Image (spheres, rainbow, N blue to C red):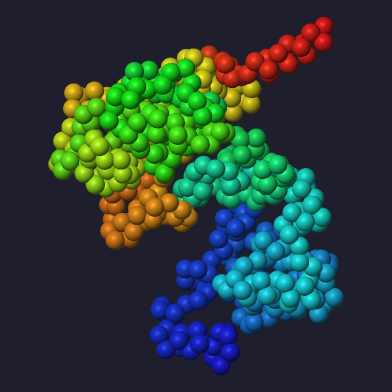
Amino acid sequence: GVPSQHRLYGAFRRLNGKVGDKSAHWFVEGYEGSEIDESLLLSPPAAAPAVSGAGAAEAADDIVFVWRDRHLPPSELLSTLRERNISNVTIVGVKASHCVQATAQMLCDQGLAVTAVREAIEDDKPKRLDAVMTHLLPIYADVVSLDGFINGVLGSEGFSSDTGAGSTKRNSSIRYLADCRRSGHMHLYASALLRKGGWRKYPTQTWYSDALCGKEFICPIGKQILDFCDEPAFSKISMFIRGREWLDEKEKIVSLAGDSMPKTYVIQNGEWVEESPVAGESTLFFLKEAEKNGGKAVQVYRSPAECLANATDAASTYVVQGHIASPLLTADGHKCHVKVYCLLHCDDDGTSWTLYTCKDCYLSVSETRWSPTDVSHEAQITTLRSTRLKTGCAPDIFKAWPGVYGRCQALIGDIVGRGIELGRLRGRKDKAQQAFEIFSADFMLDEFDKLWCIEFNFTPVLYDPRAGQPLTTKGLRLYDDQYKDSGGKESEIDDGKMIADALDLIFEVDKKLQLSEDSLWDLCATIEGTYSTVTPGACGERTQATVASFRRMLG
């Protein structure tokens, strides 16, 4: 065991001597934390033998565990390497300043060639990590990037055959996912799937760099097709619906929503397109960039002329909408809207669609009381969710809620169904690939009980306190504070179960056939569409002319 006077670990030994194994058991055999986490192994053995507390024990022909009870690795490590005639060793680890550097020093002393993979080594002190990786470790080892290691040592094809399809064949119950850092909710999806079990993270590499936009694109190592990743070209199931812009972009959705949306006007290149609103049409007008979502993208003005004057970005398309007359307010006089979350799935035949809506909706309320002449964001913008609206409830703040959910659901079905029927939303039959997406739809009621569709949002803010997501918005920080204040019990804003239930519907065949009673998702509609690879009207006149010219050239 560890000597009680050991400079690094002696304090642990002394504490263990005082309180016993039950209270202090860092890596003590038989206690939680000493077992091998099989999710760390690419191809875990079907039945790994017990690993003794000291020395080496083979769990499979290619997997050996060597435990250490000192700062330096034990002699068993060297004997194992010699027995297998290993002369090149690659090091990864979670403590650069301790076990990693100690192991590198010992192996270097024995004349072995040592490689350290920069992205696969960590330390609890970032500055110390940088110092070790930059100045100390290169004395004993070749420090390389992950891309350099894969391409220079294994070769990406060799890696993918050893870890991707090969490991899946050996253990078909394991599925692989990768976060390629595209915009979207992959971080939340990955967290939910990994917690569920049966899933493992797959490493990534640079796919290519776009010099024009200065962006680097990521893909799974070896450009493998995985069970799930956020880069559609490398995923069996895509998390992006083709044609999603027809619901997401403000100037496009009006063609599908019709008179269920407020009258919408368009500004391009500093000019009104086709027609402009009349000055007395409304007391207030909202100016929005068509491709942006969220309250920050909305400006409030008293006249169409002010909207036109402030649509200053020539590269952007803007929409202008008048305020809904006589909006139905909360009991205390605040403006509000209902947010409904939706899940849309298309099968790999490209034509079979299933639309779900979440039973738990939300009321988003303005910060201050509403006035028809107040242009402040605090009075007019309703972005942050505040109250969970469960089916059948009648909250005092919004007594109109009973019955509204069914009406919202029907309107969502109409708008999405129209988008599919017109070929705006398209499947991926050409890729034999399923596709799904979680998005939100916002609705307002007026005092005459008319239900208005305000917008669809394909990048809604979702919050899962278990995912460790970056708190990049005001809303996320607020929801996180509320969750912590509640002690994690029945927090008003917690999308974790909604996300997990959605992924069950997508990835579990039995869940698709029948919704469980405790699922947060309702079946809204099943829709059969006509498969199309190109959205009607998607090609501009110049593109069509070029295609026609090319066809003539081919005879």
Residue 180 at x, y = what percent? 61, 46
Q: Quadrant of the C terminus?
A: top right
Quick one: 210 or 124, which is closer to the camera?
210
Q: Quadrant of residue 456?
A: top left
Q: Is residue 345 visible?
A: no
Residue shown at the point (50%, 25%) measured from the top left: 271
Q: Is residue 363 above or below residue 484?
A: above
Q: Quadrant of the N terminus?
A: bottom right
Residue under the point 27% across and 43% down: 379
Q: Is residue 287 left or right of residue 42?
A: left
Q: Is residue 185 above or below residue 44?
A: above
Q: Is residue 233 visible?
A: yes
Q: Indicate the quadrant where residue 324 lies.
A: top left
Q: Nearer the viewer, residue 297 or 452?
A: 297
Residue drawn at x 51%, y 29% as measured from the top left: 270
- Which one is nearer the viewer's eye here, 247 or 98? 247
**Quadrant of res 82:** bottom right
Q: Residue furthest top?
A: 555
**Relative to 330, residue 522 above or below:** above
Looking at the image, which residue is at 83% across and 69% down?
A: 113
Counting from the top left corner in percent of width and height, residue 250 is at 44, 28
Residue 161: x, y in percent? 74, 45
The vertical placement of 164 against 55, above or below, is above
Q: Position of residue 197 (x, y in %)?
A: 49, 49
